[in-house]
Amino acid sequence: MGSLNLRKQAWIKRKKRIRKKVLGTQERPRLCVFRSARHIYAQVIDDTSGFTLAAASSLEKDTKEHSKAGDKAAVANHIGKLIAERAMGKGIKKVVFDRNGFLYHGRIKAVSDGARKTGLKF
């Protein structure tokens, strides 16, 4: 097996640098976002106990209905709204945003904008 390519190595380096500083507690869990080439995933995680409190992804059946061909930002915005609704349903109003090593623009920003519009504070 060869070594990882340079882009992935840089992403892992950024991810580790961010995770040193960002920690989810019971009062303010961590909203972690992962973006692949085709899909986007969001989780609300309590790092002290190690449990995922809420999750949403673009693979879910109701999310696929909202997606149009080529409009990944709209799907990401919907995922942000969905994760905020699920978190607020469990009594979580404040979170710490973890962009997971990705740059804060495009789909990552769309997730955070959707969560903020729904009422989640971070």
Image (cartoon, grey):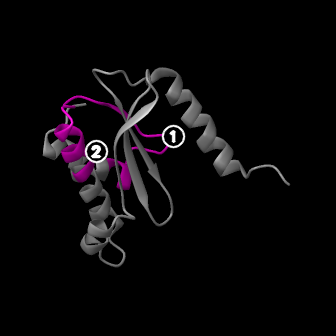
Work out which residue is located at the far bottom of the displayed protein and give it: 69
Q: Is residue 120 visible?
A: yes
Q: Is residue 106 visible?
A: no
Q: Which residue is mark 2?
A: 112
The reply to whether the magenta stretch includes residue 23 is no
Counting residues from the start of the chain, the first of labels 2 and 1 encountered is 1
Q: Residue at x 63, y 42 (%)?
A: 10
Q: Is residue 49 above or below residue 101?
A: above
Q: Are marks 2 and 1 in contact (CB under 8 Å)?
A: no
Residue 61 is situated, as x and y percent measured from the top left of the image, at 32, 69
Q: Residue at x 53, y 22 (%)?
A: 20
Residue 40 is situated, as x and y percent measured from the top left of the image, at 41, 57
Residue 96 is situated, as x and y percent measured from the top left of the image, at 33, 29
Q: Which residue is mark 1?
A: 101
**SS type, badge 1:** loop
**Range drawn in magenta:** 82-109
Q: Is residue 13 left or right of residue 49?
A: right
Q: Residues within 10 Å of mark 1 (few under 14, many from 20)?
A: some
Work out which residue is located at the far right of the displayed protein and give it: 1
The N terminus, quarter of image: bottom right
Q: Is residue 2 above or below residue 90?
A: below
